[in-house]
Image (cartoon, rainbow, N blue to C red):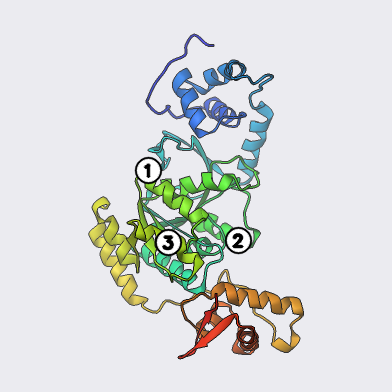
């Protein structure tokens, strides 16, 4: 053990030199050192250099033989990859590190950011929800993201398909931040590649993971705590009883954040988690004004923000559906293969739920035409998988 070992409850001072930043990265990338262990080691040893020197002895005391700290070459490669991707390193304790995130006991010591880090200094609200979101869920995500953006909030989400992608897309012009589960340069899912590039150009992407890391399932819960930790509130739009969105909501509650929820149809499994949260006391959300009102005690300038949100809501009482992130137009029924027909059936079913949806709205959401979608609706109705209602509405049969 080193003799200059110290103990402190204060967060570590940010690194001020390239050598210090290199040591922080090397410590954080060493085996079995996550954010919590990093903070403990820094508190006990005072610096990353001292912690790195002590690690092998600590590992032996824990029964781990032949422990080696992260090789310097790996950190050199990460820094080189970051320069190639034009990523910037934010260090805990520095003035450009997100203030709310810094309050967490397991705050990421380091964040890679691609884009404009100044967005992190604005009021942030997270919008999360189902990957297999319904048409109504996607419209709600777009409407909330658009109106909250016009009211002065930056939208945070996780760049997943479904609700996340819809929220990012609608907030591009007013500011949006994507928190990545893997490396900030590794776009997942691939279908959101164009959106990810747009976010880097107009907003920001960030990650605590090493550059070049492909995301795995264990990385997503870690990502979720950053989504909620950055934000003043988390709005949940369509979440099943067991879903990543509910993990984010629980993280938000543990972090002292507001949790707000869009209700859903009781028979729709995609809304079961949302309805459970409302039952347990979460704030119900109908539109952006509900979010602004819930945050009013925390926002000194909420009066103006609330007026802006109300004005945006009035101006967009019937929001336009944005064509981005939609599937390509479908060929006519007489030219579709069996695989294309099955894919269209699945797209239709994924957009429908127990709540009735207008048939023309469904066709617009699919970026298609009545000639292409109409026969597929008839086939699904004959199969008993959808039901037509009065007024040109359709529902999915459970």
* Residue 211 falls left or right of residue 391: right
Quarter of the picture containing the C terminus is bottom right
Marks 3 and 2 sit apart, C-alpha to C-alpha, by 25 Å
Give whichever of discs 3 and 1 has the lower sequence position.
1
Residue at 57% in and 18% down = 58
Frontmost residue, 60 versus 209: 60
Q: Secondary structure at mark 3?
A: helix
Give whichever of discs 3 and 2 has the lower sequence position.
2
Residue 120 shows in this picture: no
Where residue 287 appears, as percent x and y from the top left, is 35, 68
How many badges with numbers are in the image? 3
Q: Secondary structure at mark 1?
A: helix
Residue at 52% in and 53% down = 244
Where residue 220 appears, as percent x and y from the top left, is 56, 48
Q: Which residue is mark 3?
A: 274
Q: Identify the disc placed on residue 16.
A: none
Where residue 243 appears, as percent x and y from the top left, is 52, 56
Vertical order, 115 against 380 (above or below)? above
Residue at 40% in and 63% down = 275
Q: Quadrant location of residue 156?
A: bottom left
Marks 1 and 2 sit apart, C-alpha to C-alpha, by 27 Å
Frontmost residue, 378 versus 197: 378
Vertical order, 398 against 156 (above or below)? below
Q: Which residue is mark 1?
A: 100
Q: Which residue is mark 2?
A: 192
* Residue 43 falls left or right of residue 374: left
Where residue 185 appears, as percent x and y from the top left, is 61, 48
Residue at 69% in and 83% down = 331
């Amino acid at each position: 053990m080193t003799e200059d070992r110290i103990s402190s409850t204060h967060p570590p001072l940010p690194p001020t030199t390239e050598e210090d930043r290199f040591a922080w990265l090397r410590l954080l990338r060493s085996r079995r050192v996550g954010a919590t262990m990093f903070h403990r080691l820094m508190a006990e040893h005072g610096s990353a250099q001292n912690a790195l020197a002590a690690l092998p002895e600590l590992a032996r005391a824990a029964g781990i033989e032949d422990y080696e700290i992260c090789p310097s070459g790996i950190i050199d490669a990460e820094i080189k990859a970051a320069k190639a991707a034009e990523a910037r390193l934010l260090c805990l304790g520095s003035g450009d590190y997100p203030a709310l995130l810094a309050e967490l006991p397991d705050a990421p010591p380091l964040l890679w950011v691609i884009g404009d880090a100044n967005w992190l200094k604005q009021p942030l609200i997270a919008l999360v929800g189902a990957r297999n979101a319904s048409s109504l869920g996607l419209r709600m995500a777009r409407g909330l993201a658009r109106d909250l953006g016009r009211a002065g909030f930056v939208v945070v989400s996780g760049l997943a398909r479904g609700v996340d992608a819809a929220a990012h897309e609608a907030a591009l012009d007013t500011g949006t931040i994507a928190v990545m589960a893997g490396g900030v340069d590794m776009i997942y899912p691939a279908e959101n590649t164009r959106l990810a590039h747009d976010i880097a150009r107009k907003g920001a992407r960030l990650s605590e993971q090493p550059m070049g890391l492909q995301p795995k399932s264990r990385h997503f819960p870690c990502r979720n705590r950053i989504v909620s930790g950055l934000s003043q509130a988390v709005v949940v739009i369509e979440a099943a009883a067991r879903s990543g969105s509910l993990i984010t909501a629980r993280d938000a509650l543990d972090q002292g954040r507001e949790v707000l929820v869009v209700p859903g149809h009781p028979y729709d499994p995609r809304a079961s988690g949302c309805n459970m949260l409302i039952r347990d006391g979460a704030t119900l959300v109908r539109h952006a004004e509900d979010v602004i009102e819930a945050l009013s005690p925390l926002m000194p300038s909420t009066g103006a923000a609330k007026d802006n949100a109300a004005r945006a809501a009035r101006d967009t009482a019937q929001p336009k559906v944005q064509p981005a992130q939609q599937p390509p137009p479908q060929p006519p029924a007489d030219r579709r293969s069996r695989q294309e027909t099955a894919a269209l059936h699945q797209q239709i079913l994924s957009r429908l739920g127990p709540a009735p949806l207008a048939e023309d709205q469904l066709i617009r959401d699919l970026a298609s035409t009545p000639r292409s979608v109409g026969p597929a609706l008839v086939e699904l109705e004959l199969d008993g998988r959808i039901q037509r209602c009065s007024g040109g509405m359709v529902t999915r049969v459970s």
